[in-house]
Amino acid sequence: MPKYDPKSLKAEEFINHEEILATLKYADAHKNDAALIDEILEKARPQKTATGCVCRGLTHREASVLLACELPDKIKKMYDIAEEIKLAFYGNRIVIFAPLYLSNYCVNGCLYCPYHLKNKTIPRKKLTQEEVRAEVIALQDMGHKRLAIEAGEDPVNNPIEYILECIKTIYSVHHKNGDIRRVNVNIAATTVENYRKLKEAGIGTYILFQETYHKESYERLHPTGPKHNYAYHTEAMDRAMEGGIDDVGLGVLFGLELYRYEFAGLLMHAEHLEAVHGVGPHTISVPRVKRADDIDPDEFDNGISDEIFEKLTACIRIAVPYTGMIVSTRETEQVRREMLRLGISQVSGGSRTSVGGYTTEERPHDTEQFDVSDQRSLDEVVRWLMENGHIPSFCTACYREGRTGDRFMSLCKSGQILNCCHPNALMTLAEYLVDYAEPETKKIGFKMIEEELAKIPNEKVRTIARENIEAIKSSNRRDFRF
């Protein structure tokens, strides 16, 4: 029987089934231990230092106690601390991105995804480079600067060479004042050599959802295709880091397996990356199973309520305070609003999950990977964020300035977010307002920028940011960054 070892490179040792079961048993035994929960929450609370603010985070076992907790007053305290952590390290900024689906050809048999090989009703489509260019122009015309590219696993139709060619095309498109400045990549687990090629192509974050950390369930849900190999999939982030990619994004698909099991596995994966590579995940995503072409979410009996979903978000934020958290348009406006408060730092906006979906006026549904619950335009999402006190950020500066991996974490931990990320967010928001925003959005946005400039602690940074924003408003000068 494999033994738990966070420093091991073997999947069944750093995501150890027996350790997860022991963790859940411990959490059940202590879920209403008020004194222990207070102790855990006190450990998690941000501590002010001479240079900023630090958080100790929590172990997977400590965080599992919080997730199991049933005491209303402790849950409220938990949510308050999650919000405190979010504001301490990410402020009121929310990074905006959009997914770009390149191809829905796939050789896997995943039971929860309509792209699975046996689905003969879904039209198969793969974008040509001209179609990629057209999609990028459509996204730039909306105002997007950051994309996450998606493709099914198919070595014939979607080889690494195709992905690399698409990345090159995306970065080459300069339309009016539009540029895609960061391409994140969400493709199947691959080799160290291929990860090196992605790094050389200038990608941002490599994203791969585990789907489920429960090995038996994983193999049942992936009955055929290369994704069936649990170890190869689970060990992908180690190969990515070996290939030079130090920004990686984790996630599970909540609803496939019991959520408390997944939560413990997710945090164990984060602990493993920290133990082996010295830096944890750059982001953690929290998708839930949604309806799609031939997929009925009711067939999966581990679905979670909105209330549990929000509690999961808060507990992840507390456990891994420096990690970005992402929620997509899978979720409704109402759910996303509450999750922003509890720890989310990135959202998609104006998303279409179909191949070639951005170049058509009507939203196509025939090649969607999942139903989009939040179907508002990007401008509507931007305005909504500002009306709720959040700064929509299109910033990609850290990646292009080499502040990735442990260098980004050092920036986050040093308390310099207000002197770096905050002004960058305001400058990219100004770009959006000048180039793309509707009149009402523009009015709200420039009022917010004026108020938020005053919060930049460093006077020199504040002055430069103000001058740059004036240059954005009065000329075609773009892409200022600290």
Image (cartoon, rainbow, N blue to C red):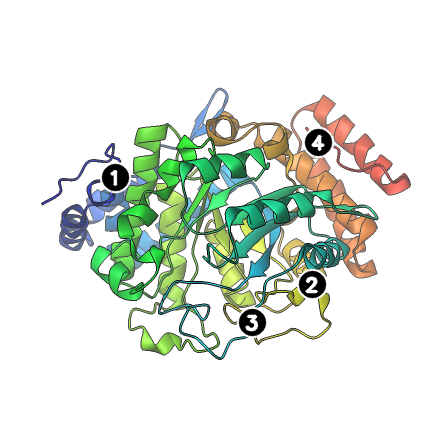
Instruction: Name the residue type under label 2.
Output: Glu
Q: Nearer the viewer, residue 165 or 214?
A: 165
Q: In the drawing, what numbered circle is on residue 435?
A: none
Give the answer, above or below, for where 244 lies relative to 109.
above
Q: Earlier in the sequence, mark 3 or mark 1?
A: 1
Q: Are the residues tagged 2 and 3 within 8 Å (C-beta)?
A: no
Quarter holding the N terminus is top left
Q: Nearer the viewer, residue 418 or 167?
A: 167
Instruction: Name the residue type under label 1.
Output: Glu
Residue that mark 4 sits on: 481
Quarter holding the C terminus is top right
The label nearer to you, 4 versus 2, is: 4
Q: Earlier in the sequence, mark 2 or mark 1?
A: 1
The label nearer to you, 4 versus 1, is: 4
Circle 1 residues within 10 Å: few <14, some 14–19, many ≥20: few
Q: On the rendered structure, is 84 left or right of 68?
A: right
Residue that mark 3 sits on: 367
For the residue labelled by badge 4, is the local secondary structure a helix, a strand or a loop?
A: loop
For the view shown, which residue lies furthest in the top direction? 50
Residue found at x 26% / y 57%: 260
Q: In the drawing, what numbered circle is on residue 39?
A: 1
Q: Earlier in the sequence, mark 2 or mark 3?
A: 3
